[in-house]
Image (cartoon, rainbow, N blue to C red):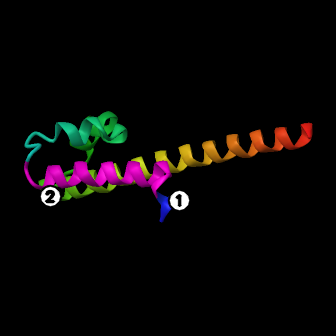
Amino acid sequence: MKKLLLTFRFWFALISILIIVQNMLGWDDKNLLLYFTTPPLLFANEWFNINWSFSGDNMLLFAYVCNFVTWYIAGLLLDLLLYRLVARKRNIYRNFK
């Protein structure tokens, strides 16, 4: 549990869930926080409006899933990068001893 709290995956996913809950509760009535914190939705919003005929609920469900997946993957990439940097640093120090 202690290791989980030290990962970017956990914190990015938690923040994503908090943004989704805030949107579901209606505190973000224009969906600005949801769309501005989800880069794929921010850039693809016009394309979705032209090419897909989603109802409002289906579009929000897609936005929620996209938000969570985007930030989980971003956290995973940061965790992998940090792991590699730490492993490389440890390997360098072992070679000098």
Q: Which is more N-terminal, label 1 or label 2?
A: 1
- Specify the segment rendered in magenta: 5-26
Left or right of residue 72, residue 17 in this image: left
Check disc 2 and report the residue beneath it. 57
Amino acid type of the residue that numbered disc 1 sits on in the rendered structure: Lys
Disc 1 element: helix
- Tell me: residue 24, above or below residue 45: below
Q: Any mark on residue 35, and which?
A: none
Check disc 1 and report the residue beneath it. 3
Front position among marks 2 and 1? 1
How many numbered marks does the figure carry?
2
In the image, farthest residue toward the front: 97
Residue 6: % across, % down: 49, 52
Q: Is residue 8 magenta?
A: yes
Label 1: how many residues lie within 10 Å, few (<14), some (14-19) or many (20+)?
few
In the image, farthest residue toward the bottom: 1
Left or right of residue 27, residue 51 in this image: right
